Image (tube, rainbow, N blue to C red):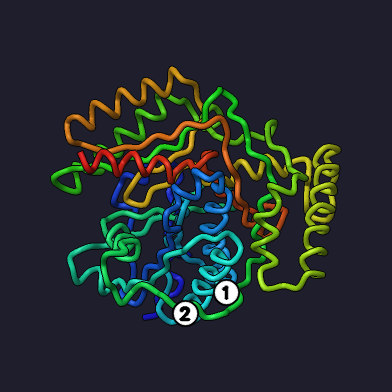
Amino acid sequence: MKTEHFYADLTATKEFSEIADLSHYVPLPDDWSVVVSDVKNSTVAINKGEYKAVNITGVSVITSILNVLKPLSIPYIFGGDGCSLCVPDNVLPAVRNALIATKSMAQMQFNLQLRIGIVPISAIRKVGYEVLVGKHQVSKTYTQAAFAGTGLEYAENLIKDDNNETEYRIESNDNIEADYTGLECRWDNVPSQHGETISLIVKVNADNQEQEYKIYSEVIYKISKIYGDESSSRPVHPDAMKTTLKGELLKYEARTRTHGKNIIQIFLYNLKIRVQVLFGRICMEYKIKTGNINWGQYKTVAVNNADYRKFDGILREVLSGNETQRHELERYLEERHQKGECVYGIHVSDSALITCMINNRTDSHFHFIDGADGGYAMAATMIKQQLKE
């Protein structure tokens, strides 16, 4: 039985709260593998102000793999300083090349060391872990993967732990090129509409799976009660979205997309970005329609297609709110932490960072959201500290 299209055939949940319901998940097929990437020492790079480089490296892995597998639909999740994807084993050679190429690109363009690896689901199940896959309908044109079980975390730890020798980590430095078509980073940071943008990570501890997902359901409900509905808590909103012409911000896309190109190609690409940004600004300002693209609605579609909350066995959200709301959330999570029910991390900034993946500009453009100044990666350092205590 062919399982290539198992993810495309999954029924998507309509409400984000349903991701805490295990009945919406199915096991990853036996002939699939988990792909992991992670920026080593990401907090060091972030502290040097290179959080955009860290973000775009993670999205570059996703883009390069999706491009090489088109039109195959696969589940993936972006974590700020890395990502995880699941792919059928028959495409592993192409996926491996995309990983190796992006590892080389990150080193040469941003001086970042990217850990990469591929772990077969059989190896994960052999040691007693499981990867369950679900799907959430974010908008009419955007469905987002969700994961349950501890298998994804196990695979990530295998690849990220430098003290662990594993056959699944890929160390190759071969000079291979990847296709980053569609990868863009042209928005300025989006200021919070309420004063703060928080990057939140919550990892539940429980004696059994039923209790674990009951707690996740309660946490998701509490967050919605504190921060309000989507229109209020979304970290990006059309009125505050502005494209940028700053070379300091556009360089991340340009360096990624022109990796391996000659000086003339690099110049022309940098020129093309600026022309496209100016054209887009005019079209969005005057609500112009070109072909199938309604530029007056472009920002609204972008907001609807943003991945600001997700679940991969760990809850991750980027939210816009105020200090009072954050303190209420911190008190709630700290109470549960003191009971041993969860660990959590919260990073506070004043804006959100957008990295984009454009299939077409009509409605198939998707937007990876993180908090500015490190977001998820910095929130994860708080969790690591709690785990040490």
| Pointers 1 and 2 in contact (C-beta within 8 Å) | yes
Q: Residues within 10 Å of mark 1 (few under 14, many from 20)?
A: some
Give the image location of residue 312, x and y in percent.
Answer: 36, 52
Can residue 131 be seen at all in this image of the molecule? no
Image quarter hosting the N terminus:
bottom left
Q: Amino acid at mark 2?
A: Val
Query: Who's the residue at 45% across and 37% down the image?
Result: 199
Residue 283 or residue 389, whichever sits in front: 389
Q: Quadrant of the C terminus?
A: top left
Q: Is residue 6 left or right of residue 279?
A: left
Structural crowding at the residue carrying mark 2, measured as other residues with C-alpha within 10 Å and reported as few (<14), some (14–19) or many (≥20): some
Say what secondary structure mark 2 lies in. helix
Residue 339, placed above or below residue 310: above
Between the C-alphas of marks 1 and 2, the distance is 9 Å
**Residue plotted at (17% across, 31% down):** 339
Question: Residue 8 location in percent, x, y?
Answer: 48, 65
Viewed as shown, does residue 90 lie left or right of 126?
right
Q: Classify 344 as above or below 377.
A: above
Residue 227 lies, in percent from the top left, at: 45, 26
Residue 354 spot, x, y in % from top left: 60, 45
* Residue at image mark 1: 68
Q: What amino acid is labelled 1 in the image? A: Val
User: Mark 2 — residue?
Assistant: 91
Closer to the chain start, of discs 1 and 2, is 1
- 242 vs 8: above or below: above
